[in-house]
Image: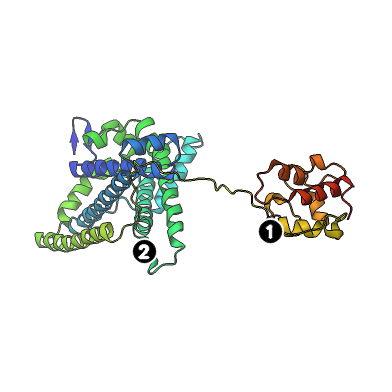
Amino acid sequence: MAVRGRYLRFPISYRIEHWVMVASFVTLAITGLAQKFAQTGIAIWLIGGLGGIETVRVIHRVAAIVLILEAVYHIGAIGYKLLVRRYGLDLMLTPQDLRNALQAFQYNMGWREDPPQQGRYTFEEKFEYFAIVWGTIVMAATGFILWNPIAATSTLPGEFVPAAKSVHSGEALLAVLAIIVWHMYHVHFRRFNRSMFTGYLPADVMEEEHPLELAEREHRAASETHRELPHVSARTYLGVYAVITVVVIAGLYAMATFERTAIETVPPSEESVTIYSPLHVDPQPIVVSFNGSMTSWDDGIGELLGVKCSFCHGGSTPLSKLNLSSYDTALLGGSSVPAIVPNDPENSGLIIEQEAGDHPVTLSAAELETLSAWIASGAPR
């Protein structure tokens, strides 16, 4: 239908459907990407502004239900047009669309003088439409798994849950980028298309982008009139579609209420609680008698350190990486100052720690004097 140089492109039902999808998609994109990149500053600000992560999840899932219901309506509307009104499959991809894409590429590169002649829907519009169809299917399937992981893993392997998370977030990011790069360019930047606002396209735009539609419009309108089925067929279709819709809505309700998948945020306690308190250990001497004639490692020094120190400084993972279970490992020292510096007891870690008096295990004065004398003599083996 033409009105003063304009042609009806989208009736009101198409436009309402479009804007419902836009609202749900934008809401899903904002709330979903805020959860995917939750540690970024803008995501923290957005989640806080929306009332917290629980509210963001609720908004995200409500928008998902709206998108699914819109898809159900869209399928029903397409079925009505195909089965009752006998409209053509204008949105289906055909080999001609691939040829049109190649011709458009050649035209944009300057290798052809004229762009491809296209009908009601261009190949760009068809590609975008089926990208939305594919994306909606993927997002609905993976979203169900994430929403109800217990129900999903009752029949699927558990690996499907992290896989669904990866696919869901990746597809969401891809969809947002496709809208920004592909849709925004073709509909808003290359030429601002007002048909989803007004329903009409100017005649010059129709002639440039949809010349075949202009040539076939009158013939197609006549064909639609003659192919329309009796009213009883419409009633039959709407009855079947109503049953399917009720089943889908019942399924959505079950999906939304079947199980709880997220831990609710616990309100912060007003009580001040100490969450970490270092354990204070008073040095306690281990009473073991050693004679004062120990002059080498094999003559008793090794046994002394083994009894007093090897509990912490021995085994496969000694404390501070200091292993006193053998002569060679003792001389290697630990992660701080050297434990044993031959001929220099004052700079040996063993003597320094014991003289400080705060080590968990302390040597007696005689034992400390013997150990110091052994180090001063060169720490012989």
Q: Which mark is residue 311?
A: 1
Along the line of sight, the residue nearer the viewer: 183 or 99: 183
Q: Position of residue 26 (x, y in %)?
A: 32, 40
Q: Position of residue 209 (x, y in %)?
A: 34, 37
Q: Against 252, is 357 above or below?
A: above
Q: What is the C-alpha distance between the residues marked 1 and 2?
A: 47 Å
Q: With 352 as the anchor, is 35 left or right in this view?
A: left
Element type at mark 1: loop
Q: Nearer the viewer, residue 300 or 224?
A: 300
The number of numbered badges drawn on the structure is 2
In the rendered image, is residue 256 in sight?
yes
Q: Amino acid at mark 1?
A: Phe
Q: Nearer the viewer, residue 208 or 336?
A: 336
Instruction: Please identify, in this view, whether the residue under mark 1 or under mark 2 is nearer the observer.
Output: 1
Nearer the observer, 182 or 270: 270
Question: Do we see residue 118 in this rendering?
Answer: no
Q: Is residue 214 above or below residue 285?
A: above
Q: Which mark is residue 242?
A: none
Residue under label 2, please give it. Answer: 150
Q: Residue at x 29, y 36 (%)?
A: 206
Asked where in the image residue 349 lies, by quadrant, the reply is: top right
Residue 9 location, quadrant: top left
Mark toward the start of the polypeptide (1 vs 2): 2
User: 10 Å neighbourhood of mark 2: few (<14), some, or many (≥20)?
Assistant: some
From the top left corner, tell me how far across and down residue 292 is, in percent.
83, 54
Circle 2: residue type: Ile
For residue 80, above or below residue 172? below
Q: Secondary structure at mark 2?
A: helix
Left or right of 96 in this view: 346: right
